[in-house]
Image (spheres, grey):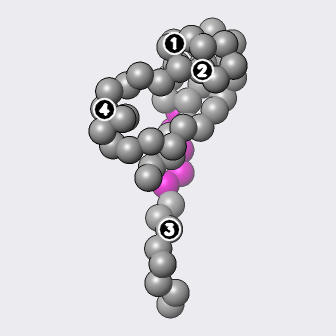
Amino acid sequence: MPVYEYRCTQCNRKFTVTMSIAEYEKKKVKCPKCGSRKVEQQPAAFYAVTSKKS
């Protein structure tokens, strides 16, 4: 599942959320510290985890 990075605009805390694409499309993310829904998605590096070793 993808990991998304957010920053709360109310308390300025940065946090990550692991959720499915369907959950992401609903956009019901809230800050774990203050509970605010005023969050901004932050740019994040993408990496894929595979089971095969080369």
Q: Are marks 4 and 2 in contact (CB under 8 Å)?
A: no
Q: Which residue is mark 1?
A: 38
Instruction: Kindly identify which residue carries mark 3.
Output: 49
| Residue 2 falls within the magenta-colored stretch | no
Q: Nearer the viewer, mark 2 or mark 1?
A: 2
Question: Of 28 and 47, which appears nearest the observer?
Answer: 28
Q: CA distance from mark 2 to mark 3?
A: 27 Å
| Element carrying mark 4 | helix
Left or right of 20? Residue 46 is right
> Is there CB contact under 8 Å for labels 2 and 1?
yes
Q: Which residue is disc 4 drawn over? A: 25
Instruction: Establish if 24 lies above or below 47.
Output: above
Q: Which mark is residue 31?
A: 2
Mark 2 or mark 3: which comes first in sequence? Answer: 2
Q: Earlier in the sequence, mark 4 or mark 2?
A: 4
Where does the image place residue 25, in percent across and percent down from the top left?
A: 31, 32
Report the amino acid beneath label 3: Val
Q: Are marks 4 and 1 in contact (CB under 8 Å)?
A: no
Mark 1 is on which residue type? Answer: Lys
Magenta residues, as a range?
42-46
> Looking at the picture, does residue 16 appear above or below residue 53?
above
Q: Is residue 44 magenta?
A: yes
Q: Residue at x 50, y 60 (%)?
A: 47
C-alpha separation, residue under disc 4 versus residue under disc 2: 17 Å
Q: Name the residue: 53% across, 20% down.
A: 30
Q: Amino acid at mark 4?
A: Glu
**Which label is found at residue 4?**
none
